[in-house]
Amino acid sequence: MARPTSTARRDLGGELRRLRGERRAVDVATALGWSESKLSRIETAHTGITETDLDRLLTLYGVRVEDRGRLRDLAKRGRARAWWTQYRSFVTDPYDEYLALEGEAISISQWEAQVMPGLLQTGEYARAVIETGAGIGDDEVVERRVNVRMDRQRVFTREPPATLRVVLDEGVLLRAVGGREVLARQLTRLYDATVQPGVEVQILPFASGAHAGLTESFLVLEFPDGTRNPVVHSEGLTGGHFRVKPEDIEVYRDAFDDLRERALSKEESRTVIAETRDRLTR
């Protein structure tokens, strides 16, 4: 089954279904000279919609011209070819969903207790993580997923670039993913990220004791005003899990604030990263 190219297309489909209200799909399609399946594909985000078709549909629904801006923007973004389209057959549906959300986020707040955040990984570190993933035994799948992970880092060079705030458990600096040399080079990458515009890295030391992130790693994705509500994402062995309820978002925001308060300062964290790397390279 085809998958939506972006959350923008899915959001537009939901809005159009809401605007249709009690009207029968067959009646709307007939009025526009469409097939019913065409309308269904648009509403279920399996196909995009041209600007002309969108205007005809919104006119039928009685939406004023001055109120169509957001829907036109969603349609335009939904028609765009997502950069990860070439990799679709190599990633799971939840990951496809995550890529779309990450690509639209303007702010990412991440707590990680096990491995380096994907947006800051080196290729060799990413490969070591992916090769040990559950259910992956195909070299081509591994290679493609490594490429996807590296391409995700374009969020820092797009316009506008995303901002990333990371709190890392101290254990991440010590876990020899890929071996000692791979980890040392990964720590150099992490060290460089501490002075990268829009990136903030803090280390949570073992000495901080119990904290709000003991049960799981997670991240909070925030989006431009007026587009969509924040989303929390956490990763499991069988795929990602999304939370969108406002009350859930607040729980995770509070947890992230607690982690930042307990973590070392940015300057202290930078020193710890450098010292850990230097011990590996002696």
Image (cartoon, helix red, strand yellow):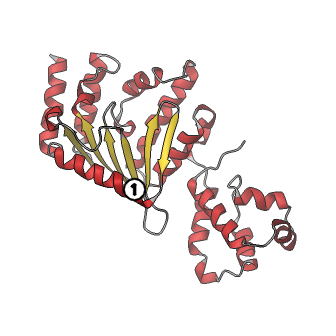
Residue pictured at 57% horizontal, 58% vertical: 8
Is the residue 204 above or below the residue 7 in the image?
A: above
Residue pictured at 57% horizontal, 34% vertical: 91
Q: Nearer the viewer, residue 13 or 89?
A: 13
Q: Position of residue 195 (x, y in %)?
A: 22, 45
Amino acid residing under circle 1: Ile
Q: How many marks?
A: 1
> What residue would you read off at disc 1?
249
Res 59 quadrant in image: bottom right
Res 224 quadrant in image: bottom left
Residue pictured at 33% horizontal, 30% vertical: 114
Using residue 56 as the reference point, say whether residue 228 is left or right of it.
left
What SS does tag 1 mark?
Answer: helix
Using residue 189 as the reference point, say whether residue 102 is left or right of it.
right
Using residue 172 as the reference point, say whether residue 36 is left or right of it.
right
Q: Position of residue 207 (x, y in %)?
A: 13, 34
Kindly tell me whether residue 106 is visible in this rendering.
no
Res 90 quadrant in image: top right
Q: Quadrant of the N terminus?
A: top right
Q: Position of residue 152 (x, y in %)?
A: 45, 41
